[in-house]
Image (cartoon, rainbow, N blue to C red):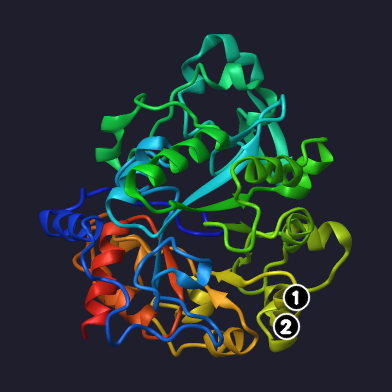
Amino acid sequence: MAKQGSNERSTANGPGRRALLGAAALGAGGAVIGLPGAAAAAPGTQAGRSGESGKGDYRSLPVPTIIGHRGTAGYRPEHTLGSYQLALELGADIIEQDVVPTKDGHLVCRHENDITATTDVADHAEFADRRTTKSVDGKALTGWFTEDFTLAELKTLRAKERIPNNRQRNTLYDGRWQVPTYEEVLDWADAEGRRRGRPVWTYVETKHPTYFRGLGLGLEETLARSLKRHGLHRRNSPVILQSFEPSSIQRLRRLVDSPAIVLLDAAGTRPWDFRQAGDPRTVDDLVKPEGLKWMAGFAQGIGPTLDLIIPKDKDGKLTSPTTLVRDAHQAGLILHPYTMRNENTFLPADFRKGTDPNAYGDAFGAFRTYFETGIDGVFTDNADTGVLARTDFQNR
């Protein structure tokens, strides 16, 4: 997930010794979940009370849930098996994948179908003529796109860091991993689950589903087949579905019973499927009690931007929390907002340190402030920071 509309500049200081020790303690069964003082769960849920992630349904996950955004994109090139593996080792409760299709209908894990910045495709002379300009969800993009490549062709490419000027340390891993298929990720999760003796939770987003359906590459049916093949199609399966297009979640819920959330972009924006269908509602309508009640009819939660939880003023400083957490909980929905990152440029101005936009700021302070609103979890590029922040929060 970008998520959409988010600032994408960053850097990558690797996880420190304290962070790695904390993550190691978690992996060894360290008691960092279910502690006194844990954030309240959504009404009617048991989130964070089971004491063990991955047992039971999504309500058994620790609260606040730490979601590895594109794996752990702060430390490894995003959406690679290396990024997913490190997120798991650093203690993430759920590992996120975004899926887009190939020309021959396979789902691969990329944040966008435009792979110009995340692979070495530009270095392959044999694909030079594939560079083109397309309109994706109303935005003109020039580059190379997954839907113009077969899976075999994509497998000749290597993944690389998307924003190397900012995450310079991540470039060390350029070329190390291929673009993974979603099936490969599920196989990886199955193997890791067996090795660890508990399921590995995954969080999968359908990217641009209306756009791809118009190309005859519907995502939902292919995704549902993969989920069923791996036994992840039930209400208590260790997977959560997500999409910025509510109709994609509705379609998926007709195919599988896996839990799902609706992602919400910035205030005032309008989901692309709403635009295509002539639905006049915007995110502003969806976060009202009536909109939340409507989404609760087919989803278990929402994934709003952090700004929908606590807006910022013109100087980038936090203002007062909205009523969204309370209202969503009253509708029976959990909240997994996005995205927490360590770098100053991504943090509210209140938590920035120094003048280097790519230096780490007071991420722990920012995590604490958002946790205090009662959110049920958060997407983060830095899983180890999130895990330690949760421990601090629960021990306060």
Residue at 78%, 56% in the rendered image: 251
Residue at 76%, 43% in the rendered image: 221
Helix, strand or loop status at disc 1: loop
Task: Report which residue position mark 1 lands on.
Answer: 297
Q: Are marks 2 and 1 in contact (CB under 8 Å)?
A: yes
Label 2 sits on what residue type? Answer: Lys
Query: Residue 50 at what x, y percent from top left?
Result: 39, 74
Query: Residue 371 at what x, y percent from top left?
Result: 37, 80
Label 1 sits on what residue type? Answer: Gly
Q: Is residue 79 visible?
A: no
Residue at 50%, 75% in the rendered image: 307
Q: Give left or right: position of 242 versus 191.
A: right
Query: Residue 28 at what x, y percent from top left?
Result: 21, 56
Cα–Cα gap, marks 2 and 1: 7 Å
In the image, 173 versus 390, the foreground residue is 390
Q: Which mark is residue 293?
A: 2
Q: How many neighbours does mark 2 have within 10 angstroms: few (below 14), some (14-19), or many (20 or more)?
A: some
